[in-house]
Image (tube, grey):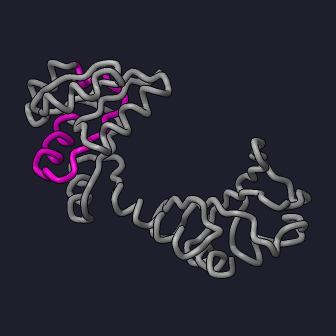
């Protein structure tokens, strides 16, 4: 069981904290707002009101003993930067931060953040892909070039095997898994035949995935 500290209990931070706790992890939630701390206190291991830009306050909470820190502060850029800098200097090995824009992300990476996410932007990307293609169920952008996508099996693929479709050569994608109702095939073979209502989890270049979306 890992130990997580989530700093900033807004919509993003609260969602991360409660989900991690739901998976059986030890989660400490910290926010300067007493109201936010009270709201989340029943859904995490511990919830504390503290100034997240005060090194002594965070040190007294034993931050150095946590495996992962999630900085869920978005709009208050100064607090986001200070909290990130402090937890890294206190020895937290992995720090994930929320950012509003590329400039904020660049600064966070410079001071030691291991991963920076853009929740609003990422959700916008998912919504846009769902709007333009009825086949796309979920869309995870790995970087500017590659993504993992959950797609409903196109009609023209039904009844054909992965080998027959030659998806890697024809579409530039790799099938990572196939959902068939409640069953998930996490290592599909080339001979596996695609069926109606199958959900494919594929990985590939964004430009190739876009072609499939348009085709679908």
Q: Where in the figure is residue 92, as x and y percent of width and height? A: 29, 31
Question: Which of 32 and 88 lies nearest the eye of the viewer?
Answer: 32
Q: How many marks?
A: 0
Q: Where in the figure is residue 75, as x and y percent of width and height? A: 17, 53
Image height of 120 relative to 52, above or below: below
Q: Where in the figure is residue 162, as x and y percent of width and height? A: 84, 64
Tell me the residue at 54%/61% (across/down). 139
Image position of 114 (left or right of 84): right
Q: Where in the figure is residue 40, as x and y percent of width and height? A: 29, 28
Image height of 56 relative to 187, above or below: above
Q: In which quarter of the image is residue 52?
A: top left
Stretch in magenta = 62-87
Question: Which of 139 and 207 lies nearest the eye of the viewer?
Answer: 139
Question: Which of 37 and 25 lies nearest the eye of the viewer?
Answer: 37
Tell me the residue at 23%/52% (across/down). 108
Image position of 68 (left or right of 61): right
Tell me the residue at 22%/38% (across/down). 8
Tell me the residue at 38%/38% (across/down). 16
Q: In which quarter of the image is residue 205?
A: bottom right
Image position of 180 (left or right of 10): right
Q: Does the magenta stretch include residue 11?
A: no
Q: Does the magenta stretch include residue 67?
A: yes
Q: In which quarter of the image is residue 144?
A: bottom left
Image position of 27 (left or right of 180): left
Q: Point out the image quarter for the C terminus.
A: bottom right
């Amino acid at each position: 069981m890992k130990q997580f500290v989530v700093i900033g209990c807004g919509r993003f931070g609260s969602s991360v904290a409660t989900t991690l706790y739901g998976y059986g992890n030890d989660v400490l939630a910290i926010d300067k707002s007493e109201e936010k701390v009270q709201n989340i206190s029943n859904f995490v291991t511990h919830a504390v009101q503290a100034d997240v830009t005060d090194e002594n306050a965070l040190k007294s909470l034993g931050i150095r003993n946590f495996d992962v820190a999630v900085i869920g502060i978005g709009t208050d850029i100064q607090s986001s930067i200070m909290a990130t800098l402090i937890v890294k200097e206190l020895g937290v090995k992995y720090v994930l931060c929320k950012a509003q824009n590329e400039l904020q992300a660049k600064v966070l990476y410079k001071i030691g953040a291991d991963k920076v996410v853009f929740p609003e932007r990422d959700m916008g990307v998912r919504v846009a892909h769902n709007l333009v293609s009825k086949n796309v169920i979920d869309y995870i952008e790995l970087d500017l070039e590659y993504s993992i996508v959950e797609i409903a099996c196109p009609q023209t693929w039904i009844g054909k095997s992965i080998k027959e479709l030659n998806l890697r050569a024809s579409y530039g994608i790799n099938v990572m898994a196939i959902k068939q109702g409640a069953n998930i095939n996490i290592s599909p073979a080339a001979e596996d035949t695609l069926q109606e209502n199958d959900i494919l989890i594929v990985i590939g270049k964004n430009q190739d995935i876009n072609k499939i979306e348009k085709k679908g």
